[in-house]
């Protein structure tokens, strides 16, 4: 059972940046899909970013080039670099790893964008 631990959330002013990290408890082998989702109260979880073991990436329309998803294989850690943050980016962010038929979620981490 892979455990995922998220870090890097917090409070930032509009226009600022945050870097979220998601550390896996063991090595992640191909093929895999790495994803970040976010959720606000009363809404469903929405896909923010996706990275496959083949190297392809996909982002939610609301990202508009502001976020970058990455994976450090040596450290078993995925990251989401978020730049030019807006108040509407305030949410709980979740990492998700899919390996073959198994899926693992992080516990969620709060990111708040406010002046």
Image: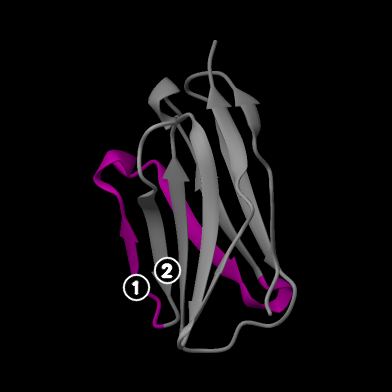
Residue 85's place in the image compared with 32, above or below, is above
Circles 2 and 1, Cβ within 8 Å, touching? The answer is yes
Which residue is pictured at 68% across the width and 80% down the height? 1
Q: Find the magenta span and give its range.
A: 54-76
Instruction: State which tag comes first along the sequence, 2 or 1.
Output: 2
Residue 34 lies, in percent from the top left, at 48, 69
Local crowd size for mark 1, using a 10 Å CA cut-off: few (<14), some (14–19), many (≥20): few
Tell me how far mark 2 sits from mark 1, CA to CA.
6 Å
Residue 78 lies, in percent from the top left, at 59, 63
Q: Is residue 61 magenta?
A: yes
Farthest residue toward the left?
Answer: 61
Secondary structure, mark 1, is loop
Q: Is residue 110 left or right of residue 49?
A: right
Residue 39's place in the image compared with 50, above or below, is above
Counting every numbered tag in the picture gives 2
Q: Is residue 90 magenta?
A: no
Q: Which mark is residue 56?
A: 1
For this rendering, which residue is in front, 110 or 113?
110
Q: Quadrant of residue 62?
A: top left
Q: Which mark is residue 51?
A: 2
Secondary structure, mark 2, is strand
Q: Which quadrant would the C terminus be assigned to in this image? A: top right
Q: Which mark is residue 3?
A: none
Q: Quadrant of residue 86?
A: top left
Local crowd size for mark 2, using a 10 Å CA cut-off: few (<14), some (14–19), many (≥20): many
Farthest residue toward the top?
Answer: 115
């Amino acid at each position: 059972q892979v455990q995922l631990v998220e870090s890097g959330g917090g409070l930032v002013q509009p226009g600022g940046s945050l870097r979220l990290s998601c550390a896996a408890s063991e090595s992640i082998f191909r093929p895999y899909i790495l994803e970040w989702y976010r959720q606000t109260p009363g809404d469903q979880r929405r896909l923010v970013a996706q990275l496959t073991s083949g190297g392809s990436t996909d982002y939610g329309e609301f990202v508009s080039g502001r976020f970058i998803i990455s994976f450090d294989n040596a450290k078993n850690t995925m990251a989401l670099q978020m730049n030019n943050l807006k108040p509407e980016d305030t949410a709980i962010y979740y990492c998700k790893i899919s390996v073959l038929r198994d899926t693992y979620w992080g516990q969620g981490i709060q990111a708040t964008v406010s002046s």
